[in-house]
Amino acid sequence: MSIQNRAVLQQSLIHEIRRFIAGTILFNQKVADRFGLRLTDMQCLNVLDLLGPVTPGKLAECTGLSTGGVTVMLDRLEKSGFIRREPNPIDRRSLLIRINARKMKKVHPLYEEINAQLDRFLGEISPSDLKSVVAFFTQMNAMRSGDLKP
């Protein structure tokens, strides 16, 4: 492959990644609007789903929000029933934030169709191509600071 063709291919990939991110953000905004939440609130719920129960400090670290901003967001999420603050069994001075699974069951149906489409699409991709895609996203996530690891 020529250098010029590779450059065009790389630019095409970057363009498609940007389209995917924009589409995802816009879809998540629609879901947030439906529940009277903010986009940041939805992303906090996503982070909690990925990490499991974490402290507010860990949420601030992962989201890039200030601790005050996280507190305000958690107040909104707790008031709307999406999260619970619980004592941290490892450190009595802190709290753990836990998703209310019952409340999230109301959100999941909004993602069912897109998840079904994704499952069908991924089912058509060869295992070796899937491994390449997983490696690609693993490396992309590793390049980002504040990676979402517990």
Image (cartoon, grey):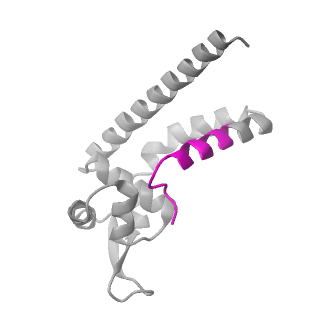
Q: Which residue lies furthest to the front in this view?
A: 3
Asked whether residue 105 is in view, the answer is no
Q: Does the magenta stretch include residue 45?
A: no
- Residue at 67% x, 37% y: name it: 133
Q: Is residue 147 left or right of residue 83?
A: right
Q: Toward which corner of the image does residue 95 lie, by quadrant?
A: bottom left
Asked whether residue 10 is in view, the answer is yes
Q: Position of residue 79 (x, y in %)?
A: 22, 66
Q: In this rendering, is residue 123 above or below 108?
A: above
- Residue at 63% x, 10% y: name it: 4
Q: In this view, does 68 lie to the left or right of 81?
A: left
Q: How many marks?
A: 0
- Residue at 45% x, 28% y: name it: 18
**Start and end of the magenta stretch?**
133-150
**Viewer-closest of 2 and 59:** 2
Majority secondary structure of magenta residues:
helix
**Viewer-closest of 149 and 51:** 149
Q: In this rendering, is residue 91 above or below 104?
A: below
**Viewer-closest of 5 and 53:** 5
Q: Position of residue 21 (x, y in %)?
A: 44, 34
Q: Toward which corner of the image does residue 59 lie, by quadrant?
A: bottom left
Q: Position of residue 40 (x, y in %)?
A: 30, 50
Q: In this rendering, is residue 54 above or below 17?
A: below
Q: In this view, does 19 lie to the left or right of 86?
A: right
Q: Where is residue 1 in the image (x, y as percent from the top left)?
A: 73, 13
Q: Does the magenta stretch include residue 143?
A: yes
